[in-house]
Amino acid sequence: MNGARIGFVGVGVMGEPMCHNLVRRHDGPVTCYDLDPAPLARLGEAGARVASSLAELADGADVVFLSLPSDREVRAVCAGDDGLIERLGAGCAVVDASTAPPALARELAGAFGQRGIAFADAPVARTRQAAIDGTLSVMVGGDAALVERLRPLLGHVASDVTHCGPVGSGQAVKILNNMILFQNVRALAEGLAIARRQGVAPGTFMEAVSRSSGDSFALRSHGMKAMLPDRYPEGAFPVTYAIKDLDYALELAAEAGIDAAGAALVKSLFDEAVEGGLGARYHPVIATLIDRKDAN
């Protein structure tokens, strides 16, 4: 897709650095659109074109990336009044890098397909720093030939691109990946709290476990970089987003007849964090609730 005109809708926490990498690395024009003017201004300074409306972006794009908060926004942008289904022409492609239910991906693929527009779900994993560095992991659902066409573009934002299967499979894998991650974060928070009560220094605990069978991405990226320094900023992946993804996972579990008790347990802790006013904080903040409980 050399020289393809790229549109990017949703330039928030992950979308802005992804779009920025497309601007830097793609050999064609990149146009962005969002309701928040601040990231648009920064991307404009970096060389992106800024659209004043979704319609303007769609009318000048061959491939449109989406990076939106939830299924509600994805549906509105694609199927709402004057949305992408109506504005894009045959031969275009939509790449949804949001995290949304697999059923919605299949529904949208069908609607776009009726108009000759290709669709792939391509949610991303890893941290915002990975988005900045262009080293995300992308899990793609869609036609194999389409995925190969998109692979060079996805390579501008990711170091790992996995074709998971047909449309919807990328979303399924991403949702379940997050379900596993959140459970790992809770387990790590519990272990850290107990170690403290045993007189083990938190840094020593983390170092020892990182050299043992308890090592994990959660430990290195969330334990060492958030829990140890007690740093849970707003503007990172918040508790409210984690709840959304866990809700999606629990829906998939219910459809499959699986009792995902571990996921439900983590969700109850996230719900408690929201009730305590921590919903906008980086999701490993649940460690502070675990620690408090163990102290009582």
Image (cartoon, rainbow, N blue to C red):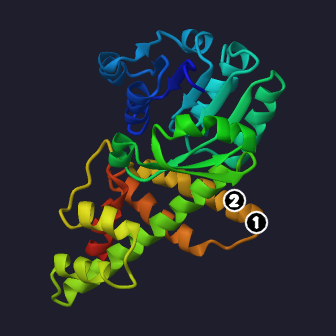
Sort mark 2 into few (<14), some (14-19) or many (20+) by Cα contacts within 10 Å.
some
Nearest to the observer: residue 176 or residue 48 = 48
Q: Do the residues labelled 2 and 1 touch (CB within 8 Å)?
A: yes
Disc 2 to disc 1, C-alpha distance: 6 Å
Res 76 label: none
Q: Would residue 68 be visible to someone looking at this image?
A: yes
Q: Position of residue 11 (x, y in %)?
A: 43, 29
* In the depicted structure, whether residue 198 falls above or below residue 237: below
Residue placed under numbered mark 1 in the picture:
256
Residue placed under numbered mark 2 in the picture:
252
Nearest to the observer: residue 98 or residue 157 = 157
Q: Quadrant of residue 293?
A: bottom left
Q: Does residue 120 appear left or right of residue 226 in this picture?
A: right
Q: Does residue 273 appear left or right of residue 207 in this picture?
A: right
Nearest to the observer: residue 144 or residue 269 = 144
What amino acid type is highlighted by mark number 2? Leu
Element assignment for label 2 = helix
Sort mark 1 into few (<14), some (14-19) or many (20+) by Cα contacts within 10 Å.
few
User: Split into 4 quadrants, where in the image is the N terminus?
Assistant: top right
What amino acid type is highlighted by mark number 1? Ala
* In the depicted structure, whether residue 170 falls above or below residue 218: above
Q: Does residue 64 appear left or right of residue 269 in this picture?
A: right
Q: Position of residue 35 (x, y in %)?
A: 44, 21
Element assignment for label 1 = helix
Residue farthest right in this picture: 114
Q: Position of residue 18 (x, y in %)?
A: 43, 35
